[in-house]
Image: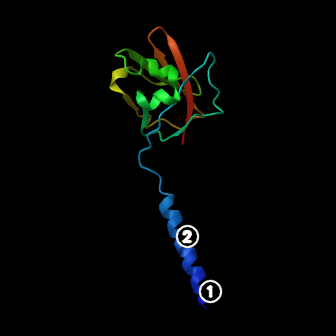
Amino acid sequence: MKSLKLFVLLALFSFVCNEVMAIPPTTRQIVIKAQQDKTRPKFETPVANLDYDKITIEFGSSVKTDTPALSRFAMSNDDVIVTIKNAEGEVVYEEVVALSEGTVVISLAGYEESEGYVLDLVYPGNEEYYGNFEIE
């Protein structure tokens, strides 16, 4: 009888722990690590899975270690063009932002899931960096 009570107690504890741990964060902030590339990225290998309600792209020290090519522009006051296209090549977001702002928050709320999205960052001098991702 004791072993049955212990088993039930452990099962209940395990269930409660799993339910608590399974609660997703309401807003996920992810640094999109774009990389310099001469070709378009392939949709089969996303760099991140993103919650479509809020996509955060951070510039600055957090990018510096992971993406040295981007850090050259991180502290400048230059503008960068941020473009997001869906798998069909349609532009779903485009904005010119100053890198000095440090963080760009993009909302794709209202867009349906796609097989993938492409993030383009176009810097002064038309240097382009690409990253691709999917929406959960």
Q: Residue at x 48, y 21 (%)?
A: 70
Q: Residue furthest front?
A: 65
Locate residue 49, reporting x and y percent. Answer: 54, 40
Q: Residue at x 51, y 58 (%)?
A: 22
Amino acid at the residue labelled 2: Ser
Locate residue 40, reporting x and y percent. Answer: 62, 20
Q: Distance between the Cα atoms at labels 2 and 1?
A: 16 Å
Q: On the rendered image, what quadrant is the C terminus found in?
A: top right
Q: Is residue 121 visible?
A: yes
Amino acid at the residue labelled 1: Ser
Q: Residue furthest top?
A: 125
Q: Residues within 10 Å of mark 1 (few under 14, many from 20)?
A: few
Q: Residue furthest bottom?
A: 1
Residue occupied by mark 1: 3
Q: Residues within 10 Å of mark 2 (few under 14, many from 20)?
A: few
Locate residue 57, reporting x and y percent. Answer: 43, 31
Q: Earlier in the sequence, mark 2 or mark 1?
A: 1
Q: Residue at x 60, y 80 (%)?
A: 7
Residue occupied by mark 2: 14
Locate residue 63, reporting x and y percent. Answer: 46, 29
State the residue in front, 118 or 89: 118
